[in-house]
Image (cartoon, rainbow, N blue to C red):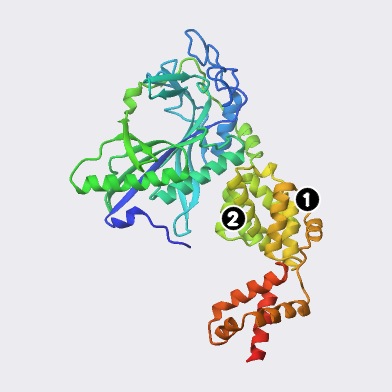
C-alpha cells in the first residue's frame, strides 16, 4: 500500500486528536415541523410558512419520516436507539434563525453509542466510535454582499430536517478523517436518507482538532474547522491546523479555543469567532413537543428494510469477486457505480471489466460531470467490450475507439467493431509481413537493438501497429519480432 505522508510525521513527539460533527440534511418531502416543501431548488424565501418563520403562537408538528430516517442511520452505524428521546431548545441570536432558538436534542438524543469502520493508512481496520446521533432543524442562509456590506437572508432552509452525527475523538490523522467522512457519506446515501451533496451543504462537517505530546492523557485545546465543502479541503485544512497548533505549543504560546474557516486560495485557516460554551445556549426541554417513543417492533420493521451497506459490500466484493481493497472501495463509494459494476460483472466476470469501469468509465463520468444513470455506455455494452478484449478480437486501442464512440454517439460494440474495421489481425503471416517491412526500413535501430538496447522493442511494436492500422495484437507482435531478430543473429 502506498505510504501516506502527513505533516505529523515531522513532529514525532506529538499526536493529533480529531472528533467530527457531521450535519446530514435529510431527504424528506416536507420540513421537520411544518408542511413546507423540503427542497434546495427554489427561489429565495419561497418555501415558508408561519411555523418555519418563527411567528408567535405557532406550534410545531413532527414529521414522522424524520424519525424513520434517524432510526435507519442509527441501525446502520450500530447505535442504541433511545426510547424515549426528547427535543430541546438551543438559543442563539443570528438573523437566519427567526425563532431565536433551534429545536435540537441536547440531553437525550435518539441514537447513541455506535461506530463506523474505516481502513487506516496501513490498511488496518479501525473503529471510529459515534457518541450520538440527534435530530435538529436547520437554520436559514445568509448571503453577504462585500461591495456594499449588506447581508441577504433566505429562510427556505429554515426548518430543514437534519441529523447531527457526533464522533468520539478517535481519529488521528487527516487521512483517517477523510476515510471516516467518505464512509459515513456512503452510508447515508445507500440508506437513501441524504443526497450527500457537499457543495449544496447536504452533507457538511465541523472538524475539532487538538494536538498533544505523546503519552499525555489530557486532550489539548481544540479548534473547530467549519464550513468546508470537500474531502480534499478538509484534509488540507487539518494538515495545516496540526502544524499551526504544534508551532504555537512549541513556541510557548496558547492554542485558543475558537472556530476557524479554511481559506482555499491562501491554504490557511483563519479565525471566525471564539467558540461558544454549552452554557451560552441556555438549553432546556422544548415544551411544545412530546417525547419520541419507538417500539421494538418499529425498529425491527425498519431494520428489515436496510440495504447492503458499503462496509459489508466492500468485504463481499473482495471475497466474491476477488477485488483488491482499493478497487472495492472505489466502486462501492458510489451506490450507482456499485450497481453498474454488479450488472457488468455478471455479464462478463473479468478483471478487464473491473479495470474499464474504474479507469475509463469513472474517468469519463468525472471529467464530463455526468451521472452514470444517463451515460450511453450501459453495463451490458461495457461488459461486451471487455469480452471482445479478452477474446483478443480487438486490442486496447480499438476498444478505446469503440468505448469513445458509444459514450458520445451510442451504438452496439460488435457492430461498431465490424463497421469501423477494428477486428484484430490475428494471423501470423500478416504480422510477419509487417514486421519484416519495419526491420527493412529501420536498419540502424535494428542494429542498436541487437547490441543490447532492449528499450527499442517498444519502438518496433509501435511501428508494426502503424503498419496494421492499429489492429495488431501487441503481445503477438512482440513475440514474433523477438523470434525474427533471433533468426537474424
List x then y, in percent, for residue 212.
28, 48
Image coordinates of residue 321 in percent, x first then y, are: 66, 60
Per the image, the residue denoted by label 2 is: 328
- Please tell me whether mark 1 or mark 2 is closer to you in this view: 1
Label 1 vs 2, first from the N-terminus: 2
Residue 229 image position (x, y, % from top left): 46, 38
- Identified at 66% across, 63% down, the residue is 351
12 w.r.t. 433: above or below: above
Marks 1 and 2, how far apart in space?
29 Å
Q: Is residue 316 visible?
A: no
The answer to whether residue 1 is left or right of residue 271 is right
Q: In this view of the protein, can residue 412 be seen by the observer?
A: yes
Circle 1 Cα neighbour tier, 10 Å, few/some/many (<14 / 14–19 / ≥20): some
The furthest residue to the left: 252
Provide the residue designation for mark 1. 411
Query: Vertical placement of 481 versus 341: above or below?
Result: below
SS type, badge 1? loop
- For the image, the number of numbered tags is 2
Q: Determine the residue located farthest toward the top in the rendered image.
A: 57
Residue at image x 44%, y 24%? Answer: 143
Depth check: 439 or 40 in front? 439
Is residue 399 toward the left or the right of residue 218 in the image?
right
Residue 169 image offset from top left, x and y in percent: 38, 44
Query: Tag 2, which secondary structure?
Result: helix
Crowd tier of the residue under label 2, counting other residues whose Cα lies within 10 Å: few below 14, some 14–19, many 20 or above: many
Quadrant of the frame with the C terminus: bottom right
Judge by depth and name the residue closer to the eye, 388 or 193: 388
Q: Quadrant of residue 152?
A: top left
Amino acid at each position: 500500500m502506498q505510504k501516506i505522508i502527513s505533516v505529523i510525521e515531522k513532529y514525532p513527539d506529538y499526536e493529533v486528536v480529531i472528533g467530527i460533527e457531521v450535519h446530514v440534511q435529510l431527504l424528506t418531502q416536507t420540513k421537520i415541523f411544518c408542511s413546507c416543501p423540503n427542497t434546495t431548488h427554489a427561489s429565495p424565501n419561497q418555501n415558508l410558512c408561519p411555523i418555519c418563520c418563527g411567528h408567535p403562537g405557532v406550534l410545531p408538528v413532527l414529521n414522522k419520516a424524520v424519525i424513520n430516517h434517524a432510526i435507519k442511520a442509527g441501525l446502520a452505524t450500530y447505535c442504541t436507539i433511545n426510547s424515549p428521546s426528547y427535543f430541546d431548545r438551543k438559543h442563539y441570536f443570528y438573523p437566519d434563525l427567526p425563532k431565536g432558538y433551534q429545536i435540537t436534542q441536547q440531553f437525550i438524543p435518539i441514537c447513541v453509542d455506535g461506530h463506523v469502520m474505516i481502513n487506516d493508512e496501513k490498511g488496518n481496520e479501525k473503529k471510529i466510535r459515534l457518541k450520538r446521533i440527534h435530530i435538529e432543524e436547520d437554520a436559514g442562509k445568509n448571503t453577504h454582499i462585500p461591495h456594499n456590506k449588506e447581508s441577504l437572508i433566505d429562510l427556505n432552509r429554515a426548518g430543514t430536517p437534519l441529523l447531527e452525527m457526533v464522533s468520539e475523538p478517535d481519529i488521528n490523522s487527516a487521512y483517517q478523517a477523510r476515510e471516516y467522512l467518505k464512509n459515513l457519506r456512503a452510508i447515508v446515501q445507500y440508506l437513501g436518507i441524504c443526497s450527500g451533496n457537499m457543495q449544496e451543504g447536504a452533507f457538511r462537517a465541523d472538524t475539532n482538532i487538538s494536538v498533544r505530546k505523546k503519552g499525555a492523557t489530557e486532550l489539548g485545546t481544540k479548534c473547530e474547522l467549519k464550513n468546508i465543502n470537500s474531502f480534499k479541503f478538509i484534509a488540507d485544512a487539518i494538515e495545516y491546523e496540526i502544524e499551526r497548533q504544534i508551532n504555537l505549543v512549541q513556541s510557548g504560546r496558547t492554542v485558543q479555543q475558537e472556530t476557524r474557516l479554511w481559506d482555499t486560495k491562501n491554504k490557511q485557516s483563519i479565525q471566525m469567532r471564539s467558540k461558544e460554551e454549552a452554557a451560552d445556549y441556555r438549553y432546556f426541554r422544548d415544551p411544545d413537543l412530546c417525547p419520541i417513543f419507538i417500539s421494538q417492533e418499529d425498529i425491527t420493521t425498519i431494520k428489515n428494510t436496510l440495504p447492503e451497506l458499503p462496509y459489508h459490500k466492500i468485504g463481499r466484493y473482495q471475497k466474491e469477486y476477488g477485488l483488491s481493497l482499493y478497487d472495492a472501495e472505489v466502486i462501492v463509494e458510489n451506490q450507482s457505480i456499485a450497481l453498474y459494476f454488479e450488472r457488468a460483472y455478471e455479464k462478463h466476470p473479468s478483471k478487464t471489466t473491473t479495470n474499464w469501469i474504474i479507469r475509463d468509465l469513472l474517468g469519463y463520468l468525472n471529467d464530463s460531470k455526468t451521472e452514470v444513470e444517463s451515460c450511453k455506455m450501459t453495463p451490458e455494452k461495457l461488459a461486451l467490450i471487455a469480452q471482445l478484449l479478452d477474446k483478443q478480437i480487438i486490442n486496447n486501442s480499438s476498444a478505446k475507439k469503440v468505448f469513445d464512440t458509444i459514450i458520445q454517439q451510442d451504438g452496439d460494440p460488435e457492430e461498431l467493431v465490424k463497421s469501423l474495421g477494428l477486428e484484430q489481425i490475428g494471423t501470423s503471416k500478416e504480422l510477419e509481413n509487417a514486421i519484416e517491412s519495419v526491420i527493412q526500413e529501420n536498419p540502424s535501430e535494428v542494429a542498436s537493438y541487437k547490441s543490447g538496447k532492449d528499450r527499442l522493442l517498444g519502438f518496433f511494436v509501435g511501428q508494426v501497429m502503424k503498419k496494421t492500422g492499429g489492429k495488431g495484437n501487441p503481445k503477438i507482435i512482440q513475440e514474433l519480432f523477438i523470434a525474427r531478430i533471433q533468426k537474424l543473429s
